Amino acid sequence: MTESVPILPRIRGPEDIKKLTFPELSRLAAEIRRCIIGTVGKNGGHLASNLGVVELTIALHLVFDSPRDKIVWDVGHQCYAHKLLTGRYGAFSALRRRGGLAGFPKRSESPHDSFNTGHASTSVSAALGFLAGERILGGGGMAVAVIGDGALTGGAAYEALSHAGQLALPLVVVLNDNKMSIGPNVGGLSKYLSRLSMKAKYQLFRRTFDAMVQRIPLVGEPLHQGIQRLKRAVKAVFYTDNFFVDLGFEYVGPIGGHSLSAMVQVFRDVRRLGRPVVIHVITRKGKGYNNAEEDPGTYHGVSAPAPRGGLSFTEVFGRSILKAAERDGRVVAITAAMEKGTGLSAFKKAFPRRFFDVGIAEEHALIFAAALAARGLKSVAAVYSTFIQRGVDQVIHDAALQKLPVILALDRAGFVGEDGETHQGLFDISLFRPVPGMRILCPAGAAELHLMLDWALGEAAPPGGPIAIRYPKGEVPVEEAAFSRPLVEGRGVWVSGPEGAGRICLAFTGGLYAEVLRAREILAGRGLRADCYNLRFLKPVDEDYLASIMDRYDLTVFVEEGIREGGFGEYALALARKRNCGGRVLVLAVEGDFEGLGTRRELLKANRLDGEGIAAYALSGVSGVSFRETSKSFSF
C-alpha cells in the first residue's frame, strides 16, 4: 500500500488491520487522529480521551478477536477509534448527530459494541459477566475491560475487581493510565518481573510445581500456602503498588501505551495466561494534538461550534454559590469529578478548604455531603441530573431519613443533547418527588436560580431534608421582572402578563420558559389568550392554590421537561381529580422510550415540547380533537 493512498477508508473491520505492517499501522494511527480531530471540531464530543487511546485500540483489535472476544470500554467516551476500526468510518461524520453514530458504545449500532456504556466504573463488572456467561454456555471467547481516565475512583470497579479475583477467570483488565487516575509504577525490575511472569514457560512451570507440592502427603497444602505467602512477600519488595496482586490478579506493566509493538507483545502473552490479569498502560491524554496534550481537562469534552450570548445556568450557579460562600463560612461544595462541568472552578480557587472533588463516586459524595450537613455545615453537592441516578439510595437513606438539608444542584436537567440516552436528565423529578421531606425547585432564569440557592442555604438547618435545584444545560433566557420576585414556598409565579385573563393556563417547569412563551404567541395568533405559570416549586406544593388554578381556567396544561410517569404533571392531574376541579387538565411531558441523539432543540421538537408542539397540544385540549388531528391541520 503506497504512502499516498489513505488506509482508514479501506478498513471494514478488525480483520483488515491484521493484514497491515507496523509502519502501515503507524500511518493508520495518524489518520485516525486526524479524522477524530476534524469530526469533533465540527460535531463536538470527547477529544482528548479518544486521542490518547488510538494505538491501544489498534493493538487490542490486532490481538483479540472482536466480536467473539468482548471489549468493554469504561464510560465509553474513548471509543471513537474503536468505531473507526469496526466498519463505521463512512458514518463517522454524523457522530453525535440525530440519526447518526452515538458518542458511546451502543449494541444496536454494531456487534463489536458488546455493552452499552456512558457512566463510569461499569466495565470490569460487565466484562466479568461476559466471561462467566461464556463458561456457563461452553464458549471460549475472552473478555477485556478497558478502564481508566478516573473511572477507577468509582466503587463499582473495586467491587468487580474483588469478585474477579474470587472467580479466577481469565479476565483482562487494561488500566489506561493517562495521569488522570492511578500514578505509574515505575522501575526496570518491575517491568522485567512483569514480563517474565507472562511467559508461557513460566506459567507452565508454576502450574506444574503447584500441583506437585499440593500432592505431597500431609504437608502438601500447608506447604503450598506457605510458598504462596512467600511469593507475595517477595513481590511486595519489588512492587510499589501490588493492590491488584493482592486481589488475585497478575500485574503487567507499566508499558508504553503508544508503542504498538510493546502492547501487541504483551496482549499476545496475556491471551495464553488463563487467569485474571491487569495490564497497566501509560498513555498521554490528547496525544497528537498540542492543545489537548497541554490542557486535557479542557479538551476532554468539546462542544460543537455555536454562537454564545449570555451566561449559562452552570455559570450562574457558580457565581451564586461563590457569593454565598463569601457571606457564610459554613457553605461547602462537593462534586464527583465535575469541577469545571458544574461551574465550581472559581469556588475551588477561592475556598480550597471548603471544596471537595471526590472523584467519580456519586454515592460517596452524597453520604459525605450528608455528614457535613449533620456537622452543621451547608453542603451543596453539584451533580449532573443523569449521575444523581447513581445516588438515589444515598439521598433517601443518608439525607432524607435523617432530615439532613443536603442541597443538590442538579445541572443538565432535562434534555442534554448529543451525548445520547445515557446523559439525558429526565428522571430526577420522578425519582425524588415521592421521597418524604424532599424539596424540588426549578428556576426559569438567573435571578430565580440565585434566589433558590439562597433560599435553600437559608433553610439548611435541621429539621429539614434534601433540597434539589434542577436546571438545564444551556443559556439563561432574557430576564423577566417576575424572576426576581421573592419565593413563596409551594407556589410559582405568573410571567408575561397577569393571571386570569385567558382561558388557558400553561404551567411549566423552568427550563421550558422560552418554549412556553413561543406557544403563548402562537395561541394568541389563533385568538386564544394563554397565561403562563412558572411552577418554581415541584415539591412542596400549595395544593389549595394549585387546585384553584385548575378550577379557574378552562384548560390547564402542565408542560414538564422530564419523564411523564411519576412526574409533576401526573401528580397535578391526580390532585385535580381529587379536588373535583372544574377545568380540563392535560399533561405534556416525555413519554415512550429512552431519548437518544439530537440537539436539545431537536429533542424538544420530537417530544412536542417546543413552542409549536405545546401550542398544538393546548389547542387540541380546547377544541376537543386529538393532538394528531390538530397537529396535522395546525398552520404555524
Image (cartoon, rainbow, N blue to C red):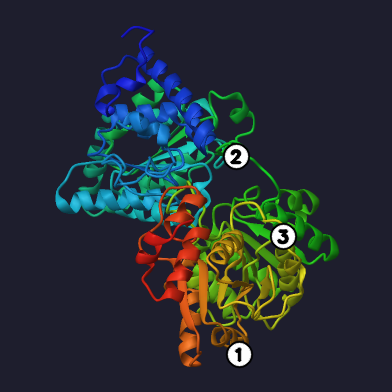
Nearer the observer, 563 or 608: 608
- Disc marking residue 306: 2
Placement of 464 over or under 91, stated as above or below: below
Name the residue type under label 2.
Ala
Q: Nearer the viewer, residue 305 or 115?
A: 305
Q: Residues within 10 Å of mark 1 (few under 14, many from 20)?
A: few
Q: Name the secondary structure under disc 2.
A: loop
Q: Mark 3 and mark 1: span between their CA atoms?
A: 28 Å
Q: Residue at x 60, y 28 (%)?
A: 293
* Residue labelled with disc 3: 446
Q: Secondary structure at mark 1?
A: helix
Q: Position of residue 342 (x, y in %)?
A: 64, 53
User: Which numbered circle lies on residue 528?
Assistant: none
What amino acid is found at the position of numbered circle 1 in the picture? Asp
Q: Which residue is mark 1?
A: 544
Amino acid at circle 3: Ala
Q: In the image, 84: left or right of 201?
A: right
Badge 3 or badge 1: first in the primary sequence = 3
Q: What secondary structure is marked by label 3? A: helix
Q: For this rendering, which residue is in front, 533 or 366?
A: 533
The reply to whether dot 2 and dot 3 touch (C-beta < 8 Å) is no
